[in-house]
Amino acid sequence: MRIAVASEGSFVTGHFGHCDSFTIFDAENGAIVKQESIPNPGHRPGFLPNFLADRGVNVIISGGMGGGAVEIFNERNVEVIVGASGEAKAAVEAYLKGDLKTTGSVCHEHQHHGECHG
């Protein structure tokens, strides 16, 4: 299983499209076996969900995300977890234990990307 976290440094970012990077975790048998960080190649409508899905991502974790991105991830069979916060690795470990659930928080106004609260 491949899990991507929209990240600012080692922390989950508040808004998916405007993150600094994506921390990609590979997990096997409920444990993280590999971690890498890839820079955000740039926010443009529809691009990032396909960029991550094309890299084999099965789950995306973020603080918030726009509805268009959620729809594309759903079309690509990528599970979306929003409402996450804290350290990226801790969020993935909580997800793997079944303790991290999505809040369903969707951002509606991109010009206010620092104010996504659901």
Image (cartoon, rainbow, N blue to C red):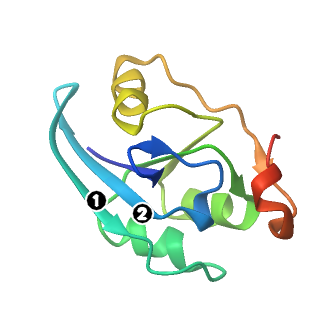
Give the image quarter of residue 26.
top left
Q: Residue furthest front?
A: 9
The residue sitting at 65% across, 57% down in the picture is 70
The crowding category of the residue bearing disc 1, from other C-alpha atoms within 10 Å (few below 14, some 14 to 19, many at least 20), is some
Name the kind of residue labelled 1 in the image. Ser
Report the front residue among 44 and 19.
19
Q: Residue furthest left?
A: 33
Does 80 sit left or right of 111 as displayed? left
Name the kind of residue labelled 2 in the image. Ser
Marks 1/2 in contact by CB < 8 Å: the verdict is yes
The residue sitting at 51% across, 24% down in the picture is 100
The residue sitting at 65% across, 35% down in the picture is 83
- The disc placed on residue 21 is 2
The C terminus: image quadrant:
top right
Q: Position of residue 63 (x, y in %)?
A: 62, 43
The residue sitting at 34% across, 53% down in the picture is 23
- The disc placed on residue 23 is none
To which residue does mark 1 refer? 37
Eyeballing the image, is 37 above or below 46?
above
Does 44 sit left or right of 86 as displayed? right
The N terminus: image quadrant:
top left
Q: Position of residue 22 (x, y in %)?
A: 40, 59
The crowding category of the residue bearing disc 2, from other C-alpha atoms within 10 Å (few below 14, some 14 to 19, many at least 20), is many
Eyeballing the image, is 101 above or below 84?
above
Q: Position of residue 90 (x, y in %)?
A: 37, 27
Q: Earlier in the sequence, mark 1 or mark 2?
A: 2
